[in-house]
Amino acid sequence: MPTRDAGNFNTAANNLNRTGTGTHPNLYSTKGTPAYGITTQVANFGTWNGTDGLWTPPYPCGTHTLISKGNVKINSYYLDLPNYPQAVDISLITHELGHAEGLGHQTSDPCHLPAVMNPYTSTRRQCNWNTPTADDAMGLRVAYS
């Protein structure tokens, strides 16, 4: 993984680790290595049906689980574009790692209820949601209480 990507994953994981402190296990260890069987992959998947990131396995609609084994895939095809600054990269990675922690999509109207778990990178970018918000923290507290 290129250095910038590794740094972005560490930043995103640290953002989530600080969200709802004490309510959920840390996603990454202090050495920055994935925990709980979560793997990460950054690769150029081409246009990939317009998808810049993906968490597998996906959750069935309307359900969530606590931290589970899976794979975070980040499409460098989009991250390498000039209109994807580092803050957007981190927002995308934080979003996908949020799925790894059991968070589902927040589908509120754009900029109405801030959440890094909003499913659209364009909305997170427009609204400047690059780190977990109070809504994301509440989702973690509910999931792990």
Image: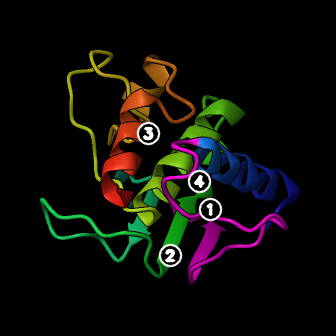
The image shows residue 69, relative to residue 78, as above or below, that is below
Give the foreground label among 4 and 3. 3
C-alpha gap between disc 2 and disc 1: 17 Å
Q: Secondary structure at mark 4?
A: helix
Instruction: Please tell me which of labels 2 and 3 falls first in the chain.
Output: 2
Q: Give, as a three-letter code, the residue at label 2.
A: Asn
Q: Which x, y percent locates residue 117? A: 38, 42
Say which residue appears at 55% left-offset and 42% top-offset: 19
Residue 92 is at least partly visible in this image: yes
Judging depth in this view, the residue of 47 and 114 nearest the camera is 114
Number of numbered discs on residues: 4
Tell me which colouring the rendered structure shows. rainbow
Give the foreground label among 2 and 4. 2
Residue wearing tag 1: 26
Q: How crowded is the residue under tag 4: few (<14 C-alpha within 10 Å), some, or many (20+)?
A: some
Judging depth in this view, the residue of 136 and 83 nearest the camera is 136
Q: Which x, y percent locates residue 56? A: 39, 74
Residue wearing tag 2: 71
Q: Secondary structure at mark 2?
A: strand
Judging depth in this view, the residue of 50 and 57 nearest the camera is 57
Instruction: Please tell me which of labels 3 and 1 falls first in the chain.
Output: 1
Q: Secondary structure at mark 3?
A: helix
The image shows residue 63, relative to residue 57, as above or below, that is above
- State left or right for residue 63 relative to residue 17: left
Return the mark for residue 84.
none
Residue wearing tag 3: 137
Q: How crowded is the residue under tag 2: few (<14 C-alpha within 10 Å), some, or many (20+)?
A: some
- State left or right for residue 13 relative to residue 52: right
Say which residue appears at 59% left-offset and 34% top-offset: 88
Residue wearing tag 4: 77
- State left or right for residue 35 relative to residue 29: left
Magenta segment: 19-46
